[in-house]
Image: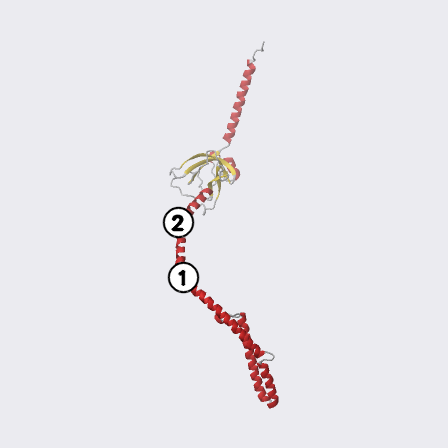
Amino acid sequence: MSAPTNHWKLGAFVAVSILVGLAATVLLTARSLRAVTVTYTSFFDEAVSGLEVGSPISYRGVKVGNVSAIDVAPDRRHVEVSYTLGVKVLRRLGIAGDATGKDTKITVPPELRVQIASTGLTGTKYLGIDFFDEQSAPPHPLPFPVPDNYIPSTPSTMKNVEDSVVRAIEQLPALVHELAGVVDRVNVLLDDVNRRGVPAKAVATLQRTDQLFATLQASLAKVDGVVARLDGKDGLVASVQRSSESLGDATGTRLGAHIDEGARDLREAAVALRQLAEALQRDPDMLVKGKSKVAP
């Protein structure tokens, strides 16, 4: 036969369990009441797909709150996003005002902005609070009054990319039109060049230039031969000089001196001819383009 149930022990166990549950509830409630928050609002001129109630809010990577509400703004174009920020963490980060409790306000400098961000290209969306340059990210004017607890927003990175792509696509027809105009002008220029026979004339000029250079080369070879005959050991100048010396011995020094002067002039002429020949060999087109200037 089984032992009778002890109703007193069972009742005591139930009562203790209820008391423990109540104590835990009170403790959790007290903690939640101590976690004082303040609500702020921002308006976004873009889709907020992926952003949900409860999504985190971070200040430069540090979590400071959560999204509390998402709704359409009064102009039915912007999206109104409200979020609660923990006063304790705001004070720790040094961006909370002097008031306490729910009256706490963020010290909003002119360059503070809220931006939609994500953990990756397809990751979880969240709101990021950070500082942006006022010139590159000015506050967007809104066609309706904003609440006191308001932080301006700035377009997300994906929004900026989308806007850049759209602007590039919009400018593409104009670029294609300008490119077509340039191609047309080039075609007209080429037709004019062909009509005037410029390519054929250029080819003929090059051919005549080649012929002129060949003639100059032949002439230079002849000049070099003449110079060699004039200025060699057995050349004309040496022969004249020897003849002048012989005549000087036979007829006197005066006639020999005149002959020596003529020989020197002839030698100088031979040297000049040799220098001209060497210069033409080094620069055959000197006769066409002229003598190059020598730096002082």
Tell me which residue sits at (55%, 18%) in the image.
13
Quarter of the N terminus within the rendering: top right
Asked if residue 87 lies left or right of residue 188, the reply is right
- The image quadrant where one finds the C terminus is bottom right
In this rendering, the label closer to the viewer, 1 or 2: 1
Residue 173's tag is 2
User: What colour scheme was applied to this rendering of the protein?
Assistant: secondary structure
At 59% from the left and 83% from the top, the residue drawn is 239
Estimate how packed mark 1 is, as few (under 14), some (14 to 19) or many (20 or more) residues with alpha carbons within 10 Å.
few
* Residue drawn where x is 58% and y is 86% of the image: 257
Residue 241 appears at what percent x and percent y? 59, 83
Q: Mark 1 points at which residue?
A: 194
Instruction: Determine the image quadrant of residue 202.
Output: bottom left
Residue at the spot x=44%, y=66% of the render? 204
* Depth order, front residue of 30/97: 30
Real-space CA distance between mark 1 and mark 2, rounded to the nearest whole angstrom: 31 Å
What is the secondary structure assignment of the residue under circle 2?
Answer: helix
| Up-down relation of residue 137 to residue 13 (above or below) | below
Q: Which amino acid does label 2 sit on?
A: Pro
Badge 1 element:
helix
Which of pointers 1 and 2 lies earlier in the amino acid sequence? 2
Whole-percent x and y of residue 66?
Answer: 48, 35
Q: Taking the image as drawn, is residue 237 in sight?
A: yes
Camera-nearest residue between 282 and 130:
282
Residue 32 is situated, as x and y percent measured from the top left of the image, at: 50, 30
Q: Considering depth in this image, is 189 or 191 the residue closer to the camera?
A: 191
Residue 276 visible in the current orientation: no
Residue 45 place in picture, x, y as percent = 42, 41
| Residue farthest to the top, as pictured | 1
Q: For label 2, count other residues whose C-alpha is less than 10 Å away and answer few (under 14), some (14-19) or many (20+).
A: few
132 or 40: which is nearer to us?
A: 132
Q: Which amino acid does label 1 sit on?
A: Asn
